[in-house]
Image (cartoon, rainbow, N blue to C red):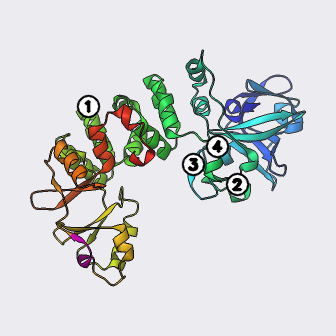
Amino acid sequence: MFFVSKLLGSPVKDAEEKTVGSLYDVVVSTRPAYPRVTALAVKRRGKLVFAPWDTVSSFEESGTLLRIAGGDLAERALARDELMLADAFLDKQLVDTEGRKVIRVNDIQLVRTGRHVHVAAVDVSSGAILRRVGLARVSERLTKGRQKPRPRLIDWRDVDLEQTDDSSVRLTVPRTKLELLHPADIADLVHELSPEERAAVLDALDDEVAADAFEEMHPSFQASLLIDLPDDKARELLGNMSPDDAADLLADLPDERRAHLIAMMEKDDADDMRELLSYPEDSAGGIMTPDFAWVKLDATAAEALESLRAQDEEVETVYYIYVLDRSEKLRGVFSLRQLLMAPPERKVRDFMTENPVAVRTDATEEEVTQLIAKYNLLALPVVDEEERLHGIITIDDAIDLVLPLAWKKRLPRIFH
């Protein structure tokens, strides 16, 4: 068996062993259950030409040898049942039968069957990540003297070609049946790498997966990584993190780097970062997240539901929905259950809890944890001296304050 990533870019030589180009992609026929290689796409002088499979005498990771002269390679259209393997599948998101994006295709496994080569599986392992960024030797170094990790392969029979499109690869199995690489596993892997290797691995990951893995990393590694990562990747990582975590991380960066990254953000995100960074790190203002669910005081239950749908991608949690007046002052709070049980025409002011427990932006960590524990809260609102709501502190943020990182990582995922 061998992998597509190790083949791409390898030299292609003609019958006289003269280099005629480099391997650009592998053309496969999708008619067999396991697609069969029918041709090789060769990049020659900026153009793509094709070598039929029956003209290939040797096909190895080190290079390909043809039985024909380089001049016999020609352009051609793909047949109806053909596709370019790497172009169609490499780096695409895997989507399970329940429509959830799982992790991306990091590599594709091929196997020889007599004279032919077939596609066997897609690879989502950490080893595949390292192969893709040219760090295969790092993987060997990490596993030297230890049992090598099992491959994380998804059998090609579980890939639904009819439902696969330009952005994702559809699977025929639910997520529960897949042994996929968890962001925490990626974090464990990169902890053992050098700073340059860590940056290379995260730069190769999909933005959301990279952000999830990044948040799983030890804080001592995060700041140094943000310094080494390219600007675009660093900005994407910060954008996919919760605002309070991103602000904590930015606070640990040198002033020039912090200002540069904030300047690259969208205006609303940049404003949030500047506000969070303006508070002492150990105060309620420094701990809170500005992403919370809210509705207007004079809204009906139906209007409140519509407002929450519009806020879907902006809020961190909907444990509680906060009620604000026209001056953005905190007037009340209600739960999602209360909202769902209320008649559509009922005003939220009629079923909300007035004068909710809250803390000022300058409250200490001790005050925050005491209030959350005393009132058994899942989130605590943070207001200024005029009672305007600026953010909330969630239960997982409170756990961060009282538990060491090593203990926090042992908790169930609901608290992360």
Q: Earlier in the sequence, mark 4 or mark 3?
A: 4
Closest to the observer, 11 or 357 = 357
- Give the secondary structure at mark 1: loop
- Give the secondary structure at mark 3: strand
Q: Is residue 292 above or below residue 69?
A: below
**Residue 254 - label:** 1
The amino acid at mark 4 is: Leu
Q: Which residue is depicted at the point 36% across and 65% down?
A: 311
Residue wearing tag 4: 90
Decide: marks 1, 4 in contact (CB < 8 A)? no
State which quarter of the image contains the C terminus: top left
State which quarter of the image contains the N terminus: top right
**Residue 172 - label:** 2
The amino acid at mark 2 is: Thr
Residue wearing tag 3: 102
The x and y percentages for residue 25 are 72, 39
Q: Earlier in the sequence, mark 1 or mark 3?
A: 3
Q: How many marks?
A: 4
Q: Which residue is depicted at the point 60% across and 15% down?
A: 145
Q: Which residues are magenta?
A: 348-353
- Give the secondary structure at mark 2: loop
Measure how far apart labels 2 and 1 are at the Cα level: 48 Å
Measure how far apart labels 2 and 4 are at the Cα level: 18 Å
Q: Does residue 242 appear to the left or right of 150 in the view shown?
A: left
Closest to the observer, 117 or 75 = 117
Decide: marks 1, 3 in contact (CB < 8 A)? no
- Residue 352 magenta-highlighted: yes
